[in-house]
């Protein structure tokens, strides 16, 4: 092995953890942006239901939540765990992958049904479905590092 | 007579005292709602930015563009109540025609980008995306400098 190849490999070995770390941070940041979207839109939608703001954007909030849930489904595919500081996903997301994916898929399906009801009948039809359609705790209790 | 006046003043004070917090809460609700929507836009534009920089796979582009278009329409509506506060400068409402024209432009361009992505694919939509996401046009003039 010539000296240049040895040198190149040594540099690659030294750089690899840095590059991997950057990639992991990107994966976690991306997930966070999507979860933030869900949190904000859920809160905004709840405000329309509580009569704190006009309900004319209710359907739009439901559509947004449905789309963000599908984004979240994809965002958790890379196995990158959080430590409670940089990210909040527990290792169980991937060690119990089948259960986590089932819950996420159920959430997407419930939001699809909620969106259909909202488009068809607005708050009157979709409002009563909200409580059973948004089951955030189902995942958060098992798969999210508790907030400190 | 003084007694009646005093009673009226006390009653008025009580009334104002009771009504004022309710009004303040309503104003705060309007501000909170706006902020929820602006934070949605911030999160989705950041996610799209990660994709454009190559840090994240691009398989969610169509979805991000649709959410941005929905949130842009939400934001245009959320500024209609004239409630100053949060990060909005009073000039939002004193120059309402300009502000609302910029918001409508934002809404129309993000909607066009989302529809283009659905009809022609993400590359067609992303070719002109910076023209749709001109956040600074409003932020420079209408948002408090933090």
Image: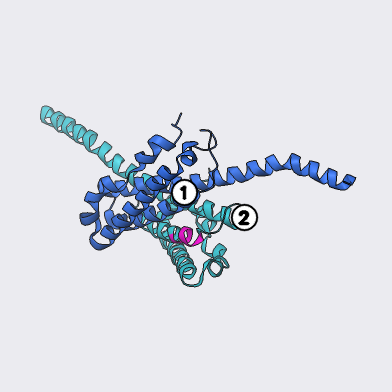
Chain colours: A blue, B cyan
- Determine if residue B85 is in view: no
Residue B113: x and y, percent?
A: 49, 67
* Residue B65, magenta (yes or no): yes
The crowd level at tag 2 (other Cα within 10 Å; few <14, some 14-19, many 20+) is few
The quarter of the picture where residue A7 lies is top right
Residue A10: x and y, percent?
A: 80, 41
The subunit carrying tag 1 is: A
* Residue A18, magenta (yes or no): no
User: Which residue is pictured at 75% across the width and 41% down the height?
Assistant: A13
- Cα separation between marks 2 and 1: 17 Å
The quarter of the picture where residue A50 lies is top left
Q: Which mark is residue B77?
A: none
Classified by dominant secondary structure, the portion drawn in magenta counts as helix
User: Which residue is pictured at 53% across the width and 66% down the height?
Assistant: B122
Q: Residue furthest right?
A: A2
Side of B80 where B2 appears, left or right = left
Dot 2 and dot 1 residues touching (CB under 8 Å)? no
Q: Which residue is mark 1?
A: A34
The crowd level at tag 1 (other Cα within 10 Å; few <14, some 14-19, many 20+) is many
Does B135 appear above or below B105? above
Q: Which mark is residue B53?
A: 2
Which region is colored magenta?
Answer: B61-66
Residue A119: x and y, percent?
A: 28, 61
Does A98 appear above or below B4? below
């Amino acid at each position: 092995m010539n000296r240049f190849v040895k040198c190149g490999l040594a540099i690659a070995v030294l750089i690899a953890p840095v590059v991997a770390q950057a990639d992991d941070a990107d994966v976690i940041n991306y997930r966070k942006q999507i979860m933030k979207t869900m949190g904000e839109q859920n809160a905004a939608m709840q405000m329309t239901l509580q009569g704190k703001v006009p309900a004319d954007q209710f359907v739009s909030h439901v559509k947004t939540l449905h789309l963000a849930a599908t984004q979240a489904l994809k965002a958790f595919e890379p196995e990158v765990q959080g430590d409670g500081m940089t990210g909040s996903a527990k290792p169980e997301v991937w060690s119990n992958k089948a259960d986590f994916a089932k819950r996420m898929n159920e959430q997407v399906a419930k939001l699809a049904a909620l969106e259909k009801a909202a488009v068809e009948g607005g708050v009157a039809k979709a409002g009563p479905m909200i409580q059973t359609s948004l089951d955030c705790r189902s995942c958060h209790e098992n798969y999210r590092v508790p907030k400190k | 007579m003084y007694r009646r006046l005093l009673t009226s003043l006390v009653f008025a004070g009580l009334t104002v005292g009771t009504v004022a917090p309710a009004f303040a809460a309503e104003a705060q609700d309007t501000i909170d709602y706006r902020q929820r929507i602006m934070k949605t836009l911030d999160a989705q534009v950041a996610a799209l930015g990660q994709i454009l920089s190559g840090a994240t796979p691009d398989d969610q582009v169509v979805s991000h563009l649709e959410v941005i278009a929905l949130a842009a329409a939400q934001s245009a509506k959320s500024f209609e109540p004239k409630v100053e506060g949060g990060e909005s400068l009073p000039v939002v409402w004193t120059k309402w025609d300009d502000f609302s024209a910029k918001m409508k432009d934002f809404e129309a361009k993000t909607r066009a980008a989302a529809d283009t992505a659905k009809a022609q694919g993400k590359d067609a939509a992303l070719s002109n995306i910076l023209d749709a996401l001109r956040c600074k046009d409003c932020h420079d003039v209408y948002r408090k400098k933090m």
